[in-house]
Image (cartoon, grey):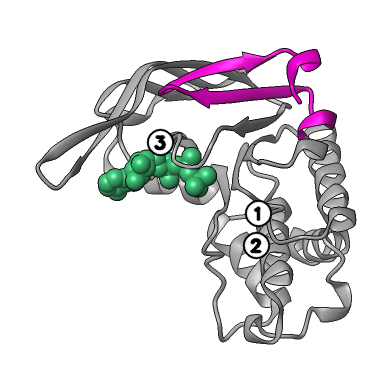
Amino acid sequence: METIIQVENVVKSFNQGSKKVEVLEGINLTVQENQLIALRGRSGSGKTTLLNLLGALDKPTSGDIYFKDKHLNKLSEKQRSEIRRTEMGFVFQSYGLVPLMSVEENVEFGLRIAGVPRSEWQENIEESLELVGLTKRKKHRPFELSGGEQQRVAIARAVAVKPKLILADEPTAELDSKMAFRIIHAFQELVKRTSTTIIMTTHDPGILEILDHVYTLEDKKIAYQKKENII
Ligand SMILES: Nc1ncnc2c1ncn2[C@@H]1O[C@H](COP(=O)(O)OP(=O)(O)OP(=O)(O)O)[C@@H](O)[C@H]1O
């Protein structure tokens, strides 16, 4: 099994006014490919901060993060952006959809910038829109959709690329529970069928219960949660 993410002694602090606030302190984490991982923790515990570091959107104050064999902190901004574009998918709270593009064009745009061969676009678009239940809305533009539907477009856009790593910040937050489980099952299928790894944050006890790998951020540290202690 290939290690996709290796985090070693990562510390992250922010300057808030004249104060330096430490959010993460000595984080160590190894993630293998083909895993679906949930990250939980109370509001403000640093979940988004950690996802930003794993996705090379931000740099740790100290410590090392490796994506496959690449030391993320040592890469140039251009190299980091190239990795984000071609090997990672993001489902973040501001969905980053292009307002002038329809649902299917937004997904297609994701495939284009990730460098997926054009011959695969149509099938990937159809498959990913079907997964999130938006086939019938594919001609609509984001402003015609609800928050939950926009969230599902962002999920389809990430899933369509089948990247090495998907980072998803509360991807099911705005969905009803039936749709939330549908998305989680789609994630489970994706990690089973392709070499994708998914790291998602969630507070939802029903979702935490069905996932095999749950990590908790608490007191600036991360801990692996044994299945029987999750809820
Ligand atoms: N750019 C920043 N500058 C200053 N402080 C920041 C910055 N980003 C995050 N923080 C602080 O870091 C802490 C952790 O924030 P983060 O968003 O990672 O938490 P979270 O666990 O994702 O919370 P939530 O569940 O509410 O989304 C918070 O106290 C926040 O104010």
Q: Amino acid at mark 1?
A: Ala
Q: Amino acid at mark 2?
A: Ala
How packed is label 1: few (under 14 Cα within 10 Å), some, or many (20 or more)? Answer: many
Q: In terms of depth relative to the viewer, which is nearer, 118 or 170?
A: 170
Q: Using the numbered discs, state the Cα–Cα distance from disc 2 to disc 1 in whole angstroms.
A: 6 Å
Mark 2 lies on residue:
154
Give the percent coordinates (x, y) of residue 209: 82, 29
| Residue lying at 50% horizontally and 19% vertically, measured from the top left | 222
Which residues, given as a range, are shown in magenta? 208-231
Q: Please tell me in which quadrant of the rendered image residue 115 appears.
A: bottom right
- Tell whether position 209 is magenta: yes
Q: Is residue 101 above or below residue 62?
A: below
Of helix, strand and loop, which one carries label 2? helix
Give the percent coordinates (x, y) of residue 103: 71, 76
Q: In terms of depth relative to the viewer, which is nearer, 109 or 59?
A: 59
Q: Is residue 96 above or below residue 7?
A: below
Q: Using the numbered discs, state the Cα–Cα distance from disc 3 to disc 2 in whole angstroms.
A: 20 Å
| Residue lying at 63% horizontally and 60% vertically, measured from the top left | 111
Mark 1 lies on residue:
158
Horizontally, is 122 left or right of 102 in the view?
A: right
Q: What number is the disc on residue 53?
A: 3
How packed is label 2: few (under 14 Cα within 10 Å), some, or many (20 or more)? Answer: many
Q: Using the numbered discs, state the Cα–Cα distance from disc 1 to disc 3 in whole angstroms.
A: 18 Å
Is label 3 in contact with label 2 (beta carbons under 8 Å)?
no
For the N terminus, the quadrant is top right
Visible in this render: residue 188?
A: yes
Q: Please tell me in which quadrant of the rendered image residue 73 appears.
A: top left
Give the percent coordinates (x, y) of residue 52: 43, 42
